[in-house]
Structures are given as C-alpha cells and as structure tokens.
Image (cartoon, helix red, strand yellow):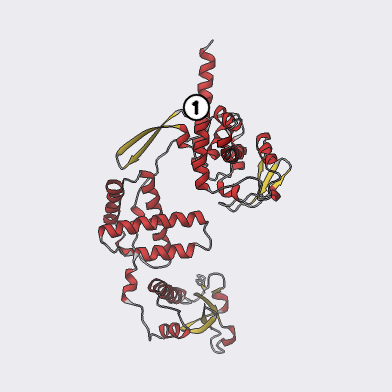
Amino acid sequence: MRATFNIRTDLISKKTNKIPIAMTITHNGFKIRKLLSGISTFEKDWSRNNQRIKANKKDEPYNNYAEYNSKIDDLSQRLNKMWSQHLINEKGELTKIMILDFLEGKQELDSKNNEINFIDCFKEFITQSKSHRAERTITGYTTVKNILINFINKTESDYTLNEIDLKFFDRLRNYCFEEVGYKNNMFARIITNIKTVMKWAEDRNYHTNLTYTKFKASEEAIEVIYLTLDELMKLYNHEFKSELKYLEKVRDIYCFACFTGLRYSDLVNLKHSNIFEGELRFTVKKTREQNHVVPLNKFANDILEKYKNDFSGPLPMISSQKLNDYIKLACKEVEINTPINITRFSGSKRIDKILPKYKTISLHSARKTFVTNSLILGMNQAVVKNITGHKSESSFRKYVKISNEVSKNEMDNIWNKL
C-alpha cells in the first residue's frame, strides 16, 4: 500500500487562492482519492518532492505549515500502522471498503497494534527484504530469526518490540554463551541483526523503543587462513591418483579462485562470455557492481584453457558444500598439514584448538590466499582492492598486516645470516 499527497489546483479557492491537499492511496490495483479536511495551502508553499508544506519566509504571514504537516505525518503514520497490523495478523486481503472505513473513523486500530510481536516483525522484515537483498543475506537473516525463536521458546517469553530492552539483551547473552555455547562473533552477528530489524521497525513507526541502540557486541579479529605461495603451487601442480581424480576439478576451481580472488557466487555464475583476452568482465553478485574487471594471470588462463570445451561453463562447478568438503580432502592428499592454532571466545571463556591446516581450508580461504600472496609479492594495495572489490578498509588492513609481518621475517632472516 502506498500513500501520496498532492495539491488539487483544479479546486483552488476563488476567495483565498488556497488549494486543498488530497491523499491518494494505491493498493492491489485500486486507488482511493480523498481530500484532507481543513488543510489547504498556497501553490508556492507546496513542496512536490517532500509532499509537505514549506515553511513561510520571515517576511511572510504564518502559513500553518507546522500544524498541517503534523496532521499529514500523523495520517501517514496511522496508515503505516494499519498496513503493518494487517500484514502481521494475516487477516486476508485488505479491501477498499476496509481502508475507507478506517479513514472515516468507522474502524479503529487494534489496541494490540502498539504491542507488535518482535518475531512477527522480524518475519515481515525478511519478507520485505527479499526484493532487494541478496539470497545469502536473506539466509543469514533467517538463521538469526530461528536462533531467536529457539531463545524465546526456551525463556517462554513472547517479546514485543517495546520489550526489546537491556533485560532482553542480558537474557539473550546468557543463553548464547552459557546454554548454547555460541562464539562472540556469532553473538555480535545476532545483535547486529536485531538492531537492523529494530531500526527498520522504528522507521516505520512500529515502536518508539530506543533501548536497542545501547546493545553492544563487538566482533573479534580471527585468524586469516590462507595458503602460502609454496602450498598453493604444491596443490596446483599435484598429480592425483586415479581413484582421487575427482579431486582434480575441485583443486582447479579452488586454485582459480586463489589466482583471481573471486567469490563462489561469482565463480558459479561465470560464463564463457565473461572471458576476454587477459581478463574477466562480469557483474559482481554480492555488490552488483557492473562490468567489474579481473586481470587473468598465466595460472588462471591455464585453468580456463583446460576446460574451454566444457559447454556447461568455464569451470566444472559443483555445490559450495561439496566443494568445501572436497578441497579439504585435496589439501590433505597434498599434505598441507601445518598445525594451525584456532582461538575463539564464548563470552569470557577461551577455546583453543590445534588443527592440521587442511581441516581449516574452505573456498573462502582462496580469496584470502589471493589477497595475502598478491600483497606479499609486492602488488600495489589499491590494485588488489580494485580487483577484489573490498569496500571496508578495516577488513583489508588485516591482509596488509600479514604481508608486512612476512616481509619483516624475510628481512630478519636474510640480514641475520650475514
């Protein structure tokens, strides 16, 4: 449902030259046009862009802009609440008669409208986000929603938007750390999603509860898992036994990502038409950046050449789940088994694990491998960022830090031998 406001110049008053303001509601193929009672203005005072009355100049008579705009705002907010209540209660189709009855005062808002259920609001937020958010983002929202449903079922509390307060935060934190054992970064992700939904609901006048802005949960820096240049070339050049030949295609997909920095979402959508001499040109799935260019080095070109006659696509793609499972097997076969210390925190509890490196490898580590090794080899930081499309400076700095540490170690090793 969409409500717009405009002036009716065809109904201008001959006595005052003022023009009445009309509201147009568009919904499900029908329109409702209604004049706003007792509100009119001069044409010069009306802002078509803002759909509100402009404040009068200092040397002009007061034009009642504050009172009239407040009435328009109030009506707009009440319509939003009616629409929200209709969506959440799922009472069937909203008809023209129902809207007219509401506008004429024959049907009031349910008193429970001021107590909108938080999970119902979260569901509406996800539904409204599907038209403009990436599928992976929607999946993330749904995961957090399900976690919150489990928490609410456990606490036997049916939280409304006005009850998302610091007590809710404390209970949720205790549940995540003490009962479920989530890591700090997972808890931070949950809180970020809650704040996103609450801000979305606030913008739509579903609540006036601002306590959620005090919720704090910081993400902790985690280890950057990547293949060193020696490990990458060892994997790239490995000849798999006949019974493990299926791992060769997985290795090629992974190494191609290591040589280009592409995400899985871009690899799976790659077509022969995206390949040009010496480079790839495509629209980035995550950021929707069009005509993104990635230069192809000789190793990436060799992999594309290997599968150039494959009509299904430039690479023999498989599901991300199978790819992540198989690349671990491939790295195990190549004996990429350096011990890796993994440290995580769940609240204040520290959790340490030592794993062979092949168990920590996933397709996402290929992108990290490209960035880290490119910087270590001396590629300009701005060029690397342009290729990968990194927008966040903080997320990119961790790779710069690693490359600087490697350079320092190399310098120390060389000079200490003198």
Let me know if residue 331 appears in the view: yes
Residue 181, given in percent of the width and then of the height, sits at 31, 45
What is the quadrant of residue 153 in the picture?
bottom left
**Residue farthest to the front?**
243
Let me know if residue 202 appears in the view: no
Residue 241, given in percent of the width and then of the height, sits at 57, 32
Q: Nearer the viewer, residue 91 or 31?
A: 91
Left/right placement of residue 270 relative to residue 74 reads: right
Which residue does the image show at 38% across and 86% down from the upper left?
A: 106
**Residue farthest to the top?**
418
Image quarter in which the C terminus is found: top right
Few, some or many residues within 10 Å of mark 1 (<14, 14–19, 20+): few
Q: Amino acid at mark 1?
A: Glu
Q: Which residue is mark 1?
A: 405
Residue 47, given in percent of the width and then of the height, sits at 55, 72
Residue 339, given in percent of the width and then of the height, sits at 43, 28
Q: Nearer the viewer, residue 154 or 33?
A: 154
**Residue farthest to the right?**
277
Which residue does the image show at 52% across and 83% down from the upper left?
A: 33
Relative height, residue 81 to residue 291 (above, below): below
Left/right placement of residue 402 relative to residue 309 reads: left
Relative height, residue 408 to residue 325 (above, below): above
